[in-house]
Image (spheres, rainbow, N blue to C red):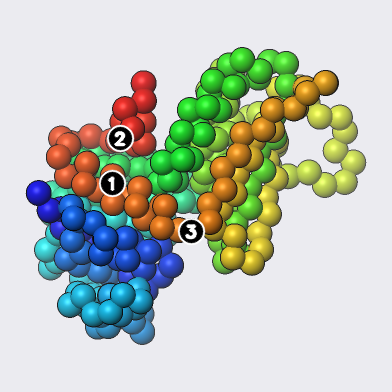
Amino acid sequence: MTTNIAVVGGAGRMGGAIVRAAQDSDEIAVSAVFEQAGNKALGEDAGVLAGIGSCGVLLADSVLDAYFDVMIDFSTPESTLANLEACTQLGKPIVVGTTGMTAEQQTALHEASKQIPVFFASNMSIGVNVALKLLEMATKALGQQCDIEVIEAHHKHKVDAPSGTALTMGEVIADALGKDLQHDGVFAREGITGARKDGSIGFSTIRGGDIAGEHTVMFIGDSERVEISHRTTDRKIFAKGALRAASWLAQQPTGLYGMNELLGFD
């Protein structure tokens, strides 16, 4: 059965990647593509903007008038909340890959999931989510004996730091250690910082060029170091993961879901 998707941010990098990936899918069809009011791309063909030729779907700014089965949103937190409200009104599922959301904004996802199926993941890559499972295992085995550092690198246009994926990695580590990331995370170091605090989880951020996404977690002991890394070379892996999530979510009842449910992890 074909799942018709609405893509938010059709003129952007991720929106274009999703439109391109959908072209190669037998289970997904793009039926609507959106941009914010005033965007100069409104009215243009989404396929042309994505570099695959005309697909007959024009960029629009009205969600409530569109036809779709599932929305995919990789926009900004503010835009995502507006689209979440629209999907709730329409009774349509939504896949959210937006990063940089506050705790309050994430609470809105939980509230909406009481009325519609909501899928949220800070990273839609299947490989990254396998890495998260490996991090949980490594932390339980090594976390009490090692210092832990999370290092991430992204393109120069990324506006939030640390990345949503890095924070998710930190949360997985903190949960496995029985810690609170907000209390034990160290997100900046400058000047005379003093010795490293035992049990802290350090973060380092790199921004530059066109790096699609790189994440490494280091478990640093006195005589050895274990590293778990994931490197992205093309955004299409995020698009493919989002399409897989959309196809799966279309068959799910009301609730909040993530990659653990999609991949069948405990």
Can see residue 220?
yes
Percent of width and height locating residue 252: 17, 37
Q: Amino acid at mark 2?
A: Leu
**Left or right side of 44 for 203:** right
Most foreground residue, 47 or 35: 47
Measuring 28% from the left and 44% from the top, which residue is drawn there? 245
**Res 108 label:** none
* 35 lies above or below 68: below
Q: Amino acid at mark 1?
A: Arg
Assign a secondary structure to mark 3: loop
**Left or right side of 86 for 77:** right
Measuring 45% from the left and 58% from the top, which residue is drawn there? 235
Assign a secondary structure to mark 2: helix
Percent of width and height locating residue 60: 23, 75
Most foreground residue, 48 or 93: 48
**Res 262 label:** 2
Could you tell me how far apart the alpha carbons at marks 2 and 1 are, in whole angstroms?
9 Å
Q: Which residue is mark 1?
A: 244
Q: Amino acid at mark 3?
A: Asp
Measuring 38% from the left and 64% from the top, which residue is drawn there? 17
Q: Which residue is mark 3?
A: 234
- Image quadrant in which you'd find residue 39: bottom left
Percent of width and height locating residue 42: 29, 81
Q: Of label 2 and label 3, which has the lower sequence position?
A: 3
